[in-house]
Image (spheres, rainbow, N blue to C red):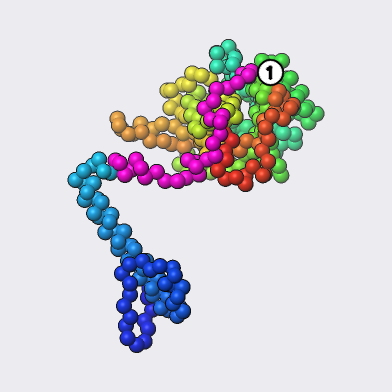
Amino acid sequence: MPSRKTKGKKKSVPTAPVAKEVLNSVKNKIKRENLLYAAKKAHNVSKHKSRKERLKMEEADPQLKEERLANNIPATIENMRIYDETVDAPIEGEDEFEEYFKNKRAPKVLITTSKFARAQAYEVSDQLINIIPGSEFVKRGHKFSMKEIAQFCINRDYTDLIVISEDKKVVNGLTFVHLPAGPTMFFSLTSLKMPKQISGHGRATNHGPELVLNNFSTRLGMTVGRLFQSLFPQTPEFVGRQVVTLHNQRDFIFFRRHRYLFKESERVGLQELGPQFTLKLRRVQRGIAEEMEWEHHPEMDKEKKKFYL
């Protein structure tokens, strides 16, 4: 804030930071503002001077810069997260995805909607069919429950079931059921952007994409990651240059799909194909929508440094 002109004799301004007690002792508002402005200016001058000196020293000795960068780690919510003993811990007990990872069963996914689905649910189903190789869409009858649909899938050797949920004509969730014995996971869905809403989007092909999973580190997070893995074939078609990314940050899972663009021999670009959306795990149930194993509650959001995935 610029200093204000005052009548009378010009007062000297400080060239160093002013203590808070000194500022509080000055009763005149204009004088107090002048002191604060001068203190900030002196602090900035000192900071720029020390930066120039440090730059000269680091140019003479590059090791000083390496040591400074190694020690200068910013404090973020991620690196201050509350310790979770299940981080990188091995999976215990029965592994529902064992058949997939031992190549005993190839993924075969059925996609359907909630009852009385509207236009947006069918648009999302078209996108999921395009994303997941070998997936099929079946329109849901009004009389069939989740367990009846799951049994329909089991009888026809499907490995996974995806149900698109909506509320007030807007898609708001995805339910994943791994067959034949579960688990069942429900995710809320927000920030949906269809490809036509993404500027400069590309046109996807039928090639099987590569799958990138980031930051699924806890035991629950690894189970979620294995669920997503089980939807895609283990042998992507690299000729298609397509990649699906599920990036977990603070328990929000960001979905993106891109294509590699080889512009030069040493440079690679990315073209977004879409869609975009964000998932958040709400509940995990054993079997086909049976016993509740884990559920998100609003109280869990109060602790900002506690993450579950």
**Quadrant in the rendering for residue 193:** top right
Q: Main secondary structure of the magenta part?
A: loop
Q: Residue at x 52, y 27 (%)?
A: 88
Residue 256 placed where, x, y %?
51, 36
Looking at this view, name the residue that lies furthest to the left. 60
Left or right position of 44 against 197 = left
Few, some or many residues within 10 Å of mark 1 (<14, 14–19, 20+): some
In-front residue for pair 301/119: 301
- Stretch of the chain drawn in magenta: 66-95
Left or right position of 160 against 200 = right
Q: Residue at x 28, y 44 (%)?
A: 65
The residue tagged with tag 1: helix, strand or loop? Answer: loop
Q: Is residue 186 above or below residue 14?
A: above
Left or right position of 273 against 112 = left
Looking at this view, name the residue that lies furthest to the right. 143
Q: Residue at x 54, y 39 (%)?
A: 82
Instruction: Look at mark 1 in the image and give the residue it sits on.
Output: 180
Q: Is residue 201 above or below residue 265?
A: below
Q: Which quadrant, please, contains the C terminus? A: top right
Residue 1 placed where, x, y %?
40, 71
- Count how many numbered circles sit on residues in the image: 1
In the rendered structure, does residue 81 fall within the stretch colored magenta?
Answer: yes
Residue 204 visible here: no
In the rendered structure, does residue 203 fall within the stretch colored magenta?
Answer: no
In-front residue for pair 205/254: 254
Residue 295 placed where, x, y %?
68, 35
In-front residue for pair 196/66: 66
Q: Residue at x 33, y 67 (%)?
A: 16
**Quadrant in the rendering for residue 36:** bottom left
Residue 77 visible here: yes
Q: Amino acid at mark 1?
A: Pro
Looking at this view, name the residue that lies furthest to the top. 104
